Amino acid sequence: KAGVTQTPRYLIKTRGQQVTLSCSPISGHRSVSWYQQTPGQGLQFLFEYFSETQRNKGNFPGRFSGRQFSNSRSEMNVSTLELGDSALYLCASSLVADRGEAFFGQGTRLTVV
Amino acid sequence: AQTVTQSQPEMSVQEAETVTLSCTYDTSESNYYLFWYKQPPSRQMILVIRQEAYKQQNATENRFSVNFQKAAKSFSLKISDSQLGDTAMYFCAGQISNFGNEKLTFGTGTRLTIIP
């Protein structure tokens, strides 16, 4: 079956703009989590959605938001971009009933200039 | 709260040799999962192996095995007969086993290079 698909793969934005990233989970997976990966901070949890509801949120400013649709696809949005938002954004989906295995997409590389 | 510590930023080993990556996991919770993920240059995070904290037996997946010492909070990954395709960043991660919690907490990673 198809894996986790993230689009776009690469993105360049200007400071102050906003951006939307998309994640399509594995078919049947209802949980979608987002992570930010930077050289300085490593991998940090942003938030997790299940059945269109945000269940967990990491320690990020309100400029970072997300949502999940009824087909489990998820989007994350970053408003008023800052240079420090440059990162690899990874999405992971999991079949909640089978706890303990998250499948990751290839990520979206966001560069803010 | 959880803390995942990987103290080896980089390691290298000759092809076909055995290498062990270290990780410590600290939490006040008694039920949790531990994982090793591999991130090759393609950037996709791939699950290598997982361990449930309540299980006494150490997990094994082909050439990959773990040594989980719960009291010592140690969770090391052993790669036997290393191959060039094992070159990647390796991340140790933990997840509290609460219903509705899918959050993974990652260590800082170990860059492993397999030398031909």
Image: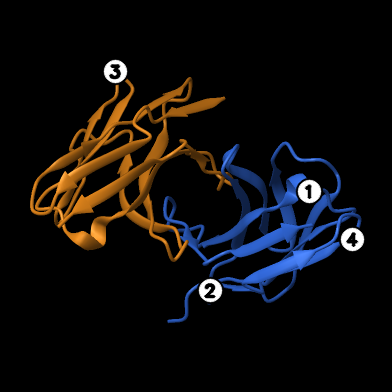
* Separation of marks 2 and 3 at Cα, in angstroms: 38 Å
Q: Which residue is mark 4?
A: A17
- Tell me the shade of chain B: orange
Q: Which residue is mark 2?
A: A28
What is the three-letter code of the residue carrying label 1?
Leu
Position of B67 relative to B112 (above/below):
above
Q: Chain ID for label 4?
A: A
- Tell me the shade of chain A: blue
Please indicate whether residue A108 sits to the left or right of residue B25 in the image: right
Residue A21 locus on image (x, y percent): 72, 67
Nearest to N terminus: mark 4 or mark 2: 4
Same chain, labels 4 and 2: yes
Nearest to N terminus: mark 4 or mark 1: 4
User: Dot 4 lies on which element?
Assistant: loop
* Separation of marks 3 and 1 at Cα, in angstroms: 40 Å
What is the three-letter code of the residue carrying label 2?
Gly
- Kindly report which numbered mark, 2 or 3, lies closer to the viewer in this rendering: 3
What is the three-letter code of the residue carrying label 4?
Gln
* Separation of marks 4 and 2 at Cα, in angstroms: 34 Å
Same chain, labels 3 and 1: no
